[in-house]
Amino acid sequence: MTDFEAVIGLETHIQLNTTTKIFCGCKADSWEEPPNSNICPVCTGLPGVLPVLNEAAVRKGALLAAAMHSEIRLTSFFDRKNYFYPDLPKGYQITQYDMAIGKGGYLNLPMPDGEMRRVGIEKLHLEEDAGKTKYEHGRRYIDFNRCGVPLVEMVTAPDLRSADEAAQYLIRLRQLLRWLGVSEANMEKGHLRCDANVSIRPVGRTDLNTKTEIKNVNSIEAVRAAINKEIDRQIELVGSGGRVESWTLDWDDAHDRLNKMRSKETEADYRYFREPDLLSLELTAAWREEVIAELPELPLARRARFMRDYDLPEYDADILTGDKPISEYFEAAVRAYHGDAKVVSNWIMNELLRILNDLGVDASELTLSPEHLAEVIKMVDAGVVNSATAKSLLVKVQEKGKSPAAIVEEEGLAQVSDDSALQVVIQKILAENPEEVNNFRSGKEGLFGWFMGQVMRETRGKADPQLTRELLQKNLSEKV
Amino acid sequence: MAILDQSAYVIAYKVKSGELSAVAVLEAALERIAAVDGRPGALDVGGLNPEDETKVHAFITLTADRAREQAEAVDARVKAGEEVGPLAGVPITVKDIFCVKGTPSTAASRILANFTAPYTATPVSRLETAGALTLGKVNLDEFTYGSSTESSAFQPSTRNPWDTTCVPGGSSGGSTASVAAGEAPLSLGTDTAGSIRQPAAFCGVVGLKPTYGRVSRYGLIAFGSSLDCPGPIARDVRDAALMLSVMAGKDPHDSTAAAVPVPDYLPSLEKGVKDMRIGLSPDYMQITFPNPETGEMERQELPKEIREAILHAAEILAKQGAEIIEDVPMPNTAYGIPVYFVVSRVEAASNLHRFDGVKYGFRTQAEYQDLREMYRKTRAEGFGLQPKLRILMGMYVSAAQYSEQYYARALRVRSLIRSDFEAAFDPEGVYRVDALLTPTTPTTAFKMADIYGDSVLMQYADQLTVPANHAGIPGISIPGGIDSGGLPIGVQLLAPDFKEETLFQIGHAFEMATADEAWRGLKPRVLREN
């Protein structure tokens, strides 16, 4: 039996997080708004209106292009893509066809085997979004709020070879979009939408076979599931002598299945032509330099630097560059700590991420600053608090907004590491529990933990565990 | 002199000085309308009665209440000693292709007959801010597609005030007729291939197509977006200049509106034409067209009266000190019409997509099974013949397999047409002309219902005006005489980008120099009979 490989390309639509829409002054984000409340004559295509390009959308688009290693064209054009649909109020979409703002480009994907896979970008252009159509009670409802929201459409080359790679591409793209601050990239809210083109071919071949297009995949899990399902379907079909037809498929998330939407044997003719209502988009070389200069260190570069400069394992570096705030938090904490970066990494990965997760915020939104974290780690190092206390201390700093030192002082959290004070506590416990002492002395050594617990209880957790252990052993071994 | 027979300039002056109230001007305008206009255009009116054939029928919608509010506001300001605009108390009509908030904005089409605009077009709002009184919306060819105003879905369509058996021209026929008949001293029109200049010539008034981008298109229901220009229609050059100065300039709602500063046109009007170089081109004294049988290009000379009017104008201007440069070659003039047929149709077909029965305007009342059928029936019933023809041709020439052959090629030829003008106007070139002097139209106004005849001169009626739209340059049509049939002859002047000032100077000099000529004393017949 022939071995097949999948050939996958992704078409993504990225909603830019500008304040206003791409061609009018309406708010770009309508997530909380009732239908048709965030609209104007321009975005609803009333007779006589004209588009005026939003510079912020161009800047964000250009920044993304720069991050995708795409060439930013100094002269690009807008075109009309003509088709009829009720949620497309002008009957054409303003987009960029053959001379878009971005030319070429790629995104590197780190693979589990340590290799980098380079995914080519074939298209990167600005366009306006259409409205939303909803079917209810046998009627069609249209919400124009989304009309004119700025999008970047990005299409990859057929460079992906599995559903996992496709998912990986989306994960890395989402990370990049948030990192750059150009999109919220929330797939559930449609900020990042994905259609997948899938075909198969015998391993070793390089030609492309008929592909199908999967639409309506709104999460990374759905992308993975839908592509896997489609690869299996195509392999089975071809294996049994069938032929893949150029279909458009709709992913039904609720039932975990693909439905055929339509055959795509004849390519629709959108009769593209230059949008006469907009001038050509002319950028200066200086403007382009300015945008490129704004480009931050990108996630993969920072990940590599963390491994190199801080001697972190790849696993740590990957997590600590998961988003920009956490990576900046880490570096600030390392600077404040002046010690082993791996120790800081451990605290962040074990404690801080849990706090972030519980609160549902990112690291830049914490009251608990990187300097606070460093201070707490130093207290542990110095034996001022034990690590259990330190963990709860972090939560308290976040909740109370006070410095760790102040909270330790206020709540008396410092460890009891004074010999004589501990000695008093231990002798009291031994005196109150003669039976346990006898049992221990007659060989029930398992009771040692119980004694430790009693000391901790008595000192409300502040006893230095090391010292407690030593003193307990000494007192218990002493025959009276 | 009746109030409405005075110029906008004089009316505004008198209103500002308190000599005349804006309300009195409005009353006079409404009286004139009642006398000459007849019933307004409407859908499904059936046949015409004999009286209809003697009236102008410029209006689709009269907005007397809006105008009265504006007039009262102007008078209140004058009374309070407050500043009023340069068009204070001047009645205007607006071609019904502009959106005006709260008024039906129909494009003379059934498909928009029930559409009331929720916003006002930039040129209209600038005129209103300047103190103009908006009398109403006037008729045009459906979506501006035509040269006679007869293709309007709103009938009776406008008639020529000089002879009501003739068309007023088009597509701004309601505008030019309303100005010629003294219903308003000013009207706002649009020009995509000659739609201001041709009806201005037919109706014996002044019509300016400004430089593309000189006046904002925001609120103008688009035909050929890369060609459309809103512009002033008036009875003399000074009024046209005054009106342009109010409307022109950049607009945050239109990125194709130019940021070029707007000069004050009025002070330079009197500068005269001394030492100006004014060109004549043999390519504008004939119509060149392909023989439908053989495809060979053939030439037909323009009627003698038209040619003589141009030569007469050249003589007058020469006497005023201009240098007349003969034989300026404009070799690509003949391609203006074919290029226009491609470019404007592609843009028009796309611009008409939005009229789909979904959001506003007409939707079929017939049964439909699905969305596609709703679209088909709505558009089949809602659009008249002209939009349908233009959609068909536009869809055809922009289809993927033909686009290169037609559309891309047409755009290349369009730039050749522009290069003709650049060569003529080049200050370092051979001709160095300040303006070209040409006929506006190959004929004077033709009879109603003749538009669908196959006279070459009629089919190629736009040949002398459309090159300015392709090139983007400004052009003006001014009255240049009356033919033996008693119909006005238009004289066209063309100038380089943003040189409207030159057109006004030459036009004004011509008006002054011909003030005593006999034809200047003639009035349109609808006014003579009053």
Image (cartoon, coloured by chain):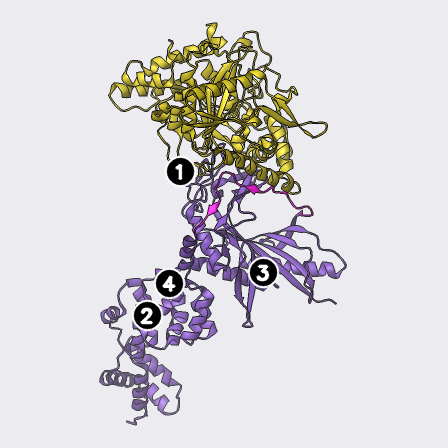
Chain colours: A purple, B yellow
Gap between marks 2 and 1 measured at Cα: 56 Å
Of mark 4 and mark 3, the one earlier in the sequence is 3
Question: From this viewpoint, is residue A44 visible?
Answer: yes
Co-location on one chain, circles 4 and 3: yes
The answer to whether the residues at label 1 and label 4 have Cβ atoms under 8 Å apart is no
User: Gap between marks 1 and 3, in whole Å?
Assistant: 52 Å
* Residue behind mark 3: A224
Q: Is residue A475 magenta?
A: no
- The quarter in which the N terminus of chain A is drawn is bottom right
Give the residue type at disc 4: Ala
Q: Chain of mark 2?
A: A
Q: Do badges 4 and 2 share one subunit?
A: yes
In which quadrant is the C terminus of chain A drawn? bottom left
Residue B404 pos. (x, y %): 63, 42
Kind of residue sitting beneath label 1: Ala
Report the span colored magenta. A263-284
Q: Tell me which amino acid carries mark 3.
A: Arg
Q: Which residue is mark 4?
A: A363
**Cα distance, mark 3 to mark 2?**
38 Å
**Residue ID at (60%, 26%):** B386
Q: Which mark is residue B259?
A: 1
Q: Nearer the viewer, mark 1 or mark 4?
A: 1
Q: Residue furthest right?
A: A241
Which structural element holds mark 3?
A: helix
Q: Main secondary structure of the magenta part?
A: loop
* The quarter of the displayed image where residue B29 is located: top left
Q: Amino acid at mark 2?
A: Leu
